[in-house]
Image (tube, rainbow, N blue to C red):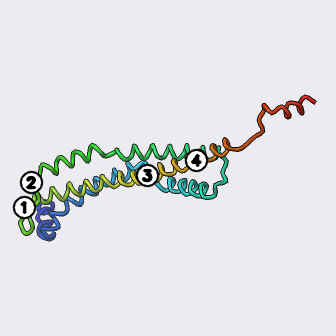
Amino acid sequence: MTSGGGRWLRDRVPGWFRGLLPLFLATLLLAAPLRAQETGDYSAWERLAGRVDQTLAVDAAPDAALLALREQVVSWRDKFLADNTANSRRLETIDRRLSMLPAPPAEGATEPEAVTSERNSLTEQRRVLEEPSVRAQLAYAHADGLVREIDEVLRLRQASAMMQRLPTPLNPTRSARRAR
């Protein structure tokens, strides 16, 4: 029974499916570590971003609270920047391998099945590797925008405080009042 196991598979599984099976298995094996590798807890980030958006919309938070929120957002932004480049070397390797394959056939032409299979496998691996990077880029842009908004609010508050007219300490009438 064990000696005919491979023959059993060949007899019962269509050829086109056997050709896709390695691609499917490679995708599964590649995707599992990548999912675990994702360091960003995007649900926590979204909660923080929502809090910051609400705080900025109300515009009633003290400067110290805005600075604390800014510090948290900057930390996330730095993390997203690091996540963006996490798979860059692996993507470069896949790109080099893809470039070494012959050009895709013209419409209606065919190419050897091994080349088609390799091209499809590499393309799928590239797609899977790019997904966390794209997500990190989007989150980075969001975080960077929030930092800029917080900075603008703080700058406007500082400018407003500097433009307020306060009594000058050099006013002689104030000095006379204090002397009494």
Residue 152 percent across, percent down from the top left? 56, 48
Residue linked to disc 2: 102
For the point 31% across and 55% down, the residue is 31
What number is the disc on residue 111?
1
Measured Cα–Cα span from mark 1 to mark 4: 56 Å
Name the secondary structure under disc 1. Answer: loop
Q: Are marks 3 and 2 in contact (CB under 8 Å)?
A: no
What number is the disc on residue 156?
none
Measured Cα–Cα span from mark 2 to mark 4: 52 Å
Packing grade of label 3 (10 A; few <14, some 14-19, many >=20) is: some
Sequence-first disc among 2 and 4: 4
Residue 161 percent across, percent down from the top left? 68, 43
Residue linked to disc 3: 141
Packing grade of label 2 (10 A; few <14, some 14-19, many >=20) is: few
Sequence-first disc among 3 and 2: 2
Q: Can you tell which of label 3 and label 2 is closer to the viewer? A: 3
Measured Cα–Cα span from mark 4 to mark 3: 17 Å
Residue linked to disc 4: 69
For the point 12% across and 60% down, the residue is 116
Q: Can you tell which of label 1 and label 4 is closer to the viewer? A: 4
